[in-house]
Image (spheres, coloured by chain):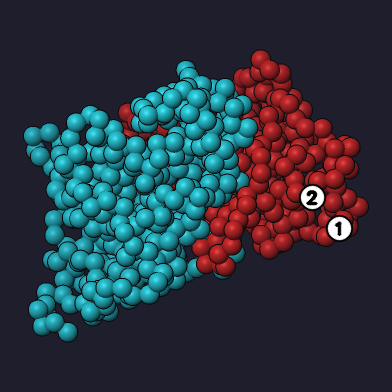
Chain colours: A cyan, B red
Amino acid sequence: MTEAEKRPQDGASNLVRADPVLEARGLTRHFRIGGLRGHTLHAVDDLDMVIAEREIVALVGESGSGKSTVARLLAMVYRPTSGEILFRGRPVSSIRGRRRVLAYRGQVPMVFQDPFSSLNPAHTIGYALVRGLKLHRPELDRRQRQAEAERVLAVAGLVPPAFIMSKYPYELSGGQRQRVGFAAALSYRPKLILADEPVSMLDVSIRIGLLNVMARLREEEKVSLLYITHDIASARYLSDRILVMYAGHLVEQGPTDDVLHNPVHPYTRLLLSAVPDPRAEMSVTSADVGEPPRVIDPGEGCRFRWRCPLATDVCAEVTPRLRSASPDHEAACHVTVPGSVPRVVAGTGR
Amino acid sequence: MTPAESRVILEVSDLCVDYASSSGTAKAVDQVSFELSEGEFLAVVGESGCGKSTLLFAIARLLSPPAEVSDGKVVFSGQNMVAMSDKALRALRWRDLSVVMQSAMNALNPVSSIRAQFFDAMKAHGESDPKVARARSQEVLSMVGIDPVHLASYAHQLSGGMRQRAMIAMALLFSPELILMDEPTSALDVVAQRSLMVQIKQLQAELGFAIIFVTHDMSLVSHFSDRVAVMYAGQVVETRPTRSLFDNPLHPYTRGLLDSFPSVYGPKVLVEGIPGSPPDLTDLPVGCNFSPRCPRATERCSAGEPALCEFDDALVRCVLYEGGTAGGD
């Protein structure tokens, strides 16, 4: 297993090994809650992730799994409690000063979940886009800004652009507003767009159009995307790779189809069994009622063990690390990862 | 369409709901008719603004101005709910017909315990003996899989899934014949969502109530409902037994909606969704409401409003199926 992990270049399709745009190492964010009593909420713990150039990575998990916190850490909204984020090989923590932070945010913009509150209702779409361009691309003159705003609107599928620019947010539908969000993000010439549940508030017939816009951004504008969602079907539709989070831990990651067809972690299996798919037969349902994860002072051990049908004693003592289950496909489970060696046998090096 | 032997408990005929607005009257529900049999699970699906929640509220007579039932009848247990006096309505509500709202966090009172709210509901409907009320509250909570100790809990102490279950428990207090559910699972994670659906189905099998389940997520009901009614711009465009609707959707809108869901397991194909967006209800297109977005629209579609016609095991509102034959399929 360790051999496979270290094999340098394996096959042409391995996007993972292309140049990383962004890398997180041991990313951790804790929140102190409960006043003086001093409880700690472990939103994200010891998370490693890599996003390659022109790669679409889906980050899935249920509410409370920490996926939005990851987005905020990557967007420099939060500072990590510990761990490091590398943007094109350079540590993000070394970015200081308003202008440099602004430049970073232009290269790694965020698109938010709620298209109804993420646009200023008092200004036109054109004003919002041009203002963003003034801030992030001061080298452009007025005409160029106008042209660029029109270009990005067209890329996001909003035509005719000049007409859309004269509109106020309330005059646009939810889907159109969310496209404006992507157009704005695109106008900063980003390397990576962080999209936090960008389609979850939209109607189903509108959603798919936006997913197609996101796919087009990768193809035509060569950006990478981190697509944060709880919707596995759309994650599959869009992404090259999928990361599954549970209670602040990354529990499984790998090429999308690999993870969905051969889920290794019991949580991923549970999640997949619960996804309604009208085209499939109804799957056997587990007794799990979907209780929220425990992330306040969680202590050692696997955080899924309370709900896990396979949990053993070692799961309560040792926090499982991501291990390779097959090439490129890793999961953090003592039980289901082949050759996973709990503490007792550790060190014998199979 | 419904098995002949089962009793019809709800009959909605030509129901229309108007919203008066400054830009004209919006027909949020437009001539909706259907029957519901005892113990049936009817799913009403559609996108936001299609009138599905308004329909549900109209059936329960929970509409408040500017919404108003402008025409039609809702006959429940032999009585027309639309014309019923408030007093008669109060006797019926919760005992025979209850409602589970979308957001349990907002539907439950944050400053009183679950017990107090359950007792309130029982008292309001004539059950003032605290012993009976306590026994029944414990019973319904256990039914939905919540430990009765949570009677003392407040809404914020429960997880989202538990809150929705508590709401369903509350709806079960008087063993009603019909429960109206307005997207009860939309705020939940998939695992909790699935678990709740399974539970609703089990309770239904045990207790035999009928359900009208409003949702925007077609795939959610695909394994649970008996029949699906698809709504678009205030109208029911297709009603059909669930399985055949999913296997072979008739109305182009139903097909478009189904094709908007990427599959988790099937072949990975490019999905296009439905172009355009739903119409403004105060300014509807001429003829078929869906025609501007319809890939199969012809001039016939704008000639006049298509009627709801029978085709196979379905009722469908599309000129393609008029006269019981599929045109151009």
Could one spot residue A172 in this view of the protein?
A: yes
Question: Of callouts 1 and 2, which one flags the residue occurring earlier in the amino acid sequence?
Answer: 2
Total count of labels:
2
Residue type, mark 2 in image: Arg
x%, y% of residue B59?
65, 35
Along the line of sight, the residue nearer the viewer: A122 or A296 = A122
Q: Residue at x 28, y 39 (%)?
A: A104
Along the line of sight, the residue nearer the viewer: A309 or A194 = A194
Along the line of sight, the residue nearer the viewer: B150 or A80 = A80
Q: Residue at x 13, y 66 (%)?
A: A317
The residue that label 1 is drawn on is B328
Q: Residue at x 25, y 30 (%)?
A: A99
The disc at residue B196 is none
- Judged left or right of residue A330, residue A188 is right
x%, y% of residue A176?
56, 35
Could one spot residue B148 in this view of the protein?
A: no
From this view, report whether residue B6 is shown above or below residue A115. Answer: below
The answer to whether the residues at label 1 and label 2 have Cβ atoms under 8 Å apart is yes
Residue type, mark 1 in image: Gly
- Mark 1 falls within which chain? B
The residue that label 2 is drawn on is B296
Q: Secondary structure at mark 2?
A: loop
From this view, report whether residue B71 is shown above or below residue A55. Answer: above
- Mark 2 falls within which chain? B
Image quadrant where residue B306 sits: top right
Image quadrant where residue A258 sits: bottom left
